[in-house]
Amino acid sequence: MSSGMNFHILTLFPDMVLPGLSESILGRAVQSGRISVEAVNIRDYTQNKHKKVDDYPYGGGAGMLMQAQPVYDACQAVEERIRTRRPEAGRPRVIYVTPQGQVFSQAMAEELAKEEDLIFLCGHYEGIDERALASVVTDYVSIGDYVLTGGELPAMVMIDCISRLVPGVLKNEESAEFESFHDNLLEYPQYSRPKIWRGMEVPGVLLSGDHAKVEAWRLEQSRERTRLRRPDLYERATRKQRALNYLMKNKLAHADMLEVLSRDQARLLHADENGVLLFDEPSGAWMASAADEDMGERLLSLVPREEKELLFSVHQDFLRDSISRRFGRNYVSACTQFVYTRKRPPEKTPGMQEYEIRPLTAEAAEEVYAGYPHHDIYSLEDIQERIGAGALFGAFVEGGLAGFAGFHREGGMGMLEVLPQYRRRGIGEALEQYLIRFFLERGWTPFCQVFLGNEPSEALQKKLGLRRAQGRVYWIS
């Protein structure tokens, strides 16, 4: 396997996917080791002597259903090979291709391109036994609202899109960035020789040699083309720009909201020069900031009252008070936000001891839960989810877990805890330095939110060079 991006396709028809992924740009990427593609035949893992992998569904109905056992065993075999190659790896993402999943997008492709291994599970017949899906799948993804005979073609579409974002796959790295759907704008029109064809001339600005004017023309063309052909994308793009204009007025205080927008993991409900409301999909949090109370009331009026489990993250006292009145939410955690604004990770303290820090595996979940004091925030299931997402890391001393830290669903660093017998050894500092490097390598902004009164944590943030934002962040549930 290559050290680049590795695609593993679980399928009943290996010969359907491999030829299509071995030509043109993808074929060259495979030959150069930028990506690797393997097709795993699910039939090889059936315990049925006739290689049968399907059966009639309980309760009746048309068609046949893929059985749980061969699907599960095939996936486990691939995961075991990944762990053998990368012992430090967390659980790989397993994508089940289904019309019932979240619709695939360029933003999702950019997120998935950061992984080293991706497993695609291709269903056939009438689908796959739900028990297998519950056991192995991390992501349910669709390429559109229509039904195909199997998951192979959608998997190939996604692999093609993701591969183009892997460094080195395209000859010109910029070509993966400045194309359709970049920043929710369609690609600008392009021209090649001859300068005049059937009476139609190449726009003069493209022949001027003035790169600044060319870029300005292309941006304007992208905006106008999007406005005319995809007004839905145009509204999304302009709304995001309005949100950035407001939030950038105080970058430190709004680092949390800026980050979820940067990672394209939020639904933007409202944005103008006086306030922003967004819904962060991974955490389920409604995040808001407003310039005044009137705007705050407008923003909160957009939050559905009928939802039972409401979680808020807001930046002003008047929003906190209004949420209490409107929604009866009175459990408030007040935090100070710290942001790491440098491009390079902090220098290690002279004489600081080196610790083994690596992603945690499922076996550590109960030990982490026992050592984490905030059970009102994270249940054992939450800890297991964070470990499964590759978002929780442990520091080890003589093979034993000494402390842990990770990042929350909304993107902030946290969950930092050093077990009592290992404190005052610099383990907490080492863990946060590890997190800062982890964030910077992915182009993320390292930030964290510290409970008011947690003076040791505040001192650590200052020592590591994080800047303290003005005001507070209130988490309300």
Image: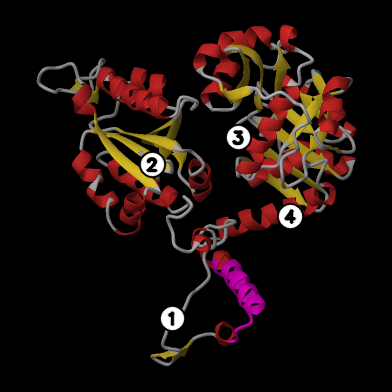
Q: CA distance from mark 1 to mark 4?
A: 35 Å
| Marking on residue 207 | none
Is residue 379 visible to us here? no
- Sequence-wise, the earlier of marks 1 and 2 is 2
The amino acid sitting under disc 4 is Arg
Q: Residue at 35% of width from left, 17% of height from top? A: 131
The amino acid sitting under disc 1 is Ser
User: Is residue 152 in the magenta section?
Assistant: no
Observer-nearest of 142 and 415: 415
Mark whose residue sits in front, 4 or 2: 2
- Label 1, residues with CA under 10 Å away: few <14, some 14-19, many ≥20: few
**Residue 136 image position (x, y, % from top left):** 39, 23
**Residue 314 image position (x, y, % from top left):** 79, 33
- Sequence-wise, the earlier of marks 3 and 2 is 2
The residue that mark 1 highlights is: 192
Q: CA distance from mark 1 to mark 2?
A: 36 Å
> Are circles 4 and 2 on residues that touch, CB within 8 Å?
no
In this rendering, would 455 be left or right of 301? right
Q: Look at the numbered disc 1 and give the secondary structure of its residue.
A: loop
**Residue 444 image position (x, y, % from top left):** 66, 42
- Label 4, residues with CA under 10 Å away: few <14, some 14-19, many ≥20: some
In this rendering, would 364 be left or right of 318? left
The residue that mark 4 highlights is: 242
Q: Residue at 44% of width from left, 59% of height from top? A: 170
Q: Look at the numbered disc 4 and give the secondary structure of its residue.
A: helix
Q: Look at the numbered disc 2 and give the secondary structure of its residue.
A: loop
The residue that mark 3 highlights is: 281
In this rendering, would 124 be left or right of 363? left
Q: Which residues are magenta?
A: 208-225
